[in-house]
């Protein structure tokens, strides 16, 4: 085993121990939803009146929301499922991981919860899935919060999708140098990491290069959703916005380089009654880059939702 692999192995041990400790302090209970695909999910339930259901983005994991949960769990119960194919979930190479599949998998999970209504929040790819769930099941969702959501397309604004078409996807990492570029694209203010943990994260991204490429192209190859959403192109949210009838909040990092904040402004204008917060000096993942600011912003917006 070379030095890089040894450091990465130690980094995994350190990270696993840290997340386990954080989960214990938060009172996390882990579960497994058994459906067409199995979905690991975490729950922080302290008998609060309302619940936040959070969906993470591409290449992320459920535990990344623990940082924001430190604040949010004081007011809300929190449910965090793992998107199939990421984190500690199963990986099925012979299965299609299209956006339609994600919507249907998470729909089954949502309907299985013994909760009348949840505040649904999603970052990036998780935001796109959340928007479709909100359109399909407004009876189960009290509010929708889009956090630097994927799937908006605007004229004159290049996005992540153009990069993928040029085979320049920042999520497909083959070297330490490419990982540094990836981090610069995701975070405006770089998060300091212990050396061994950083080595582990680099190795994870490199090891998952082909797997992430499969999921990415499964998602982008999707043409349309089933008849229940009128056969609209499923990877584009523009036409779906008018169908969302529940309260909508939009939180966006001003320095997002994957999906420019102008997309948030477009969504805000397109969704009647929506509330918009642009966070200065924050990139694509505000819940990770500045969890305190993000949590305060989300709490403020949810407090404005009628009881």
Image (cartoon, rainbow, N blue to C red):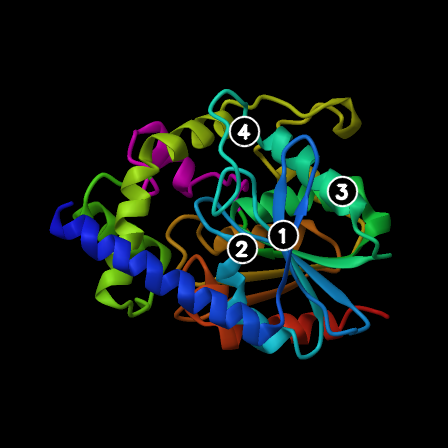
Pinpoint residue 121: horizontal percent, then vertical percent. 64, 57
> Which of labels 4 and 1 is toward the front?
1
Residue picked out by circle 2: 62
The earlier-in-sequence mark between 3 and 4 is 4
Residue pointed to by mark 4: 97
**Viewer-side residue, 147 vs 110:** 110
Q: CA distance from mark 3 to mark 4?
A: 21 Å
Taking the spot 58% from the left edge, 51% from the top edge, the residue there is 266
> Which image quadrant for residue 62?
bottom right
Say which quadrant the C terminus sits in.
bottom right
Residue at 19% across, 53% down: 6
**First in residue order: circle 4 vs circle 1:** 1
Magenta region, residue range: 150-171
Q: Is residue 17 left or right of residue 303?
A: left
Q: Which residue is mark 1?
A: 41
Magenta stretch: dominant SS? loop
Question: In the figure, is residue 34 to the left or right of 252?
Answer: right
Distance from Cα at disc 4 to Cα at disc 1:
19 Å
The stretch drawn in magenta includes residue 13: no
Q: Are marks 4 and 1 in contact (CB under 8 Å)?
A: no
Q: Position of residue 207 (x, y in %)?
A: 30, 38
Q: Secondary structure at mark 2?
A: helix
Q: Residues within 10 Å of mark 1 (few under 14, many from 20)?
A: many
Q: What residue is disc 3 on?
A: 135
Q: Secondary structure at mark 4?
A: loop
Pointer 2 or 1: first along the chain: 1
Q: Please tell me how crowded label 3 is: few (under 14), some (14-19), or many (20+) other residues with Cα within 10 Å.
A: some
The correct choice, above or below, for 234 with respect to 145 in the image is above
Quarter location, residue 161:
top left
Q: Is residue 167 magenta?
A: yes
């Amino acid at each position: 085993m070379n030095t890089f692999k040894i450091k990465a192995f130690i980094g995994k041990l350190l990270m696993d121990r840290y997340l386990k400790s954080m989960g214990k302090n938060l009172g996390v209970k882990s579960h497994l939803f058994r459906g067409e695909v199995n979905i690991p999910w975490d729950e922080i339930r302290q008998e609060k009146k309302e619940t936040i259901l959070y969906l993470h983005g591409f290449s992320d994991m459920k535990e990344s929301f623990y940082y924001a949960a430190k604040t949010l769990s004081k007011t809300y119960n929190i449910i965090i499922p793992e998107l199939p194919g990421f984190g500690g979930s199963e990986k099925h190479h012979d299965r299609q991981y299209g956006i339609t599949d994600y919507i249907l998998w998470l729909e089954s999970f949502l309907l299985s919860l013994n909760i009348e209504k949840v505040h649904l929040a999603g970052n990036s790819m998780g935001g796109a899935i959340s928007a479709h769930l909100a359109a399909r099941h407004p009876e189960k969702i009290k509010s929708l919060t889009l956090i630097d959501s994927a799937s908006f397309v605007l004229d004159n604004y290049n996005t992540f999708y153009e990069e993928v078409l040029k085979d320049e996807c920042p999520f497909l990492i083959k070297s330490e140098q490419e990982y540094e570029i990836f981090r610069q694209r995701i975070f405006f203010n770089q998060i300091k990491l212990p050396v061994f943990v950083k080595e582990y994260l680099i190795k994870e991204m490199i090891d998952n290069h082909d797997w992430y490429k499969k999921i990415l192209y499964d998602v982008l190859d999707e043409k349309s959703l089933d008849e229940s959403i009128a056969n609209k192109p499923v990877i584009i949210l523009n036409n779906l916005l008018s169908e969302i009838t529940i309260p909508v909040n939009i939180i966006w990092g001003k320095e997002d380089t994957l999906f420019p904040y102008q997309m948030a402004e477009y969504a805000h204008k397109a969704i009647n009654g929506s509330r918009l917060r642009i966070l200065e000096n924050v990139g694509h993942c505000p819940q990770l880059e500045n969890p305190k600011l993000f949590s305060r912003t989300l709490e403020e917006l949810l407090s404005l939702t009628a009881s």
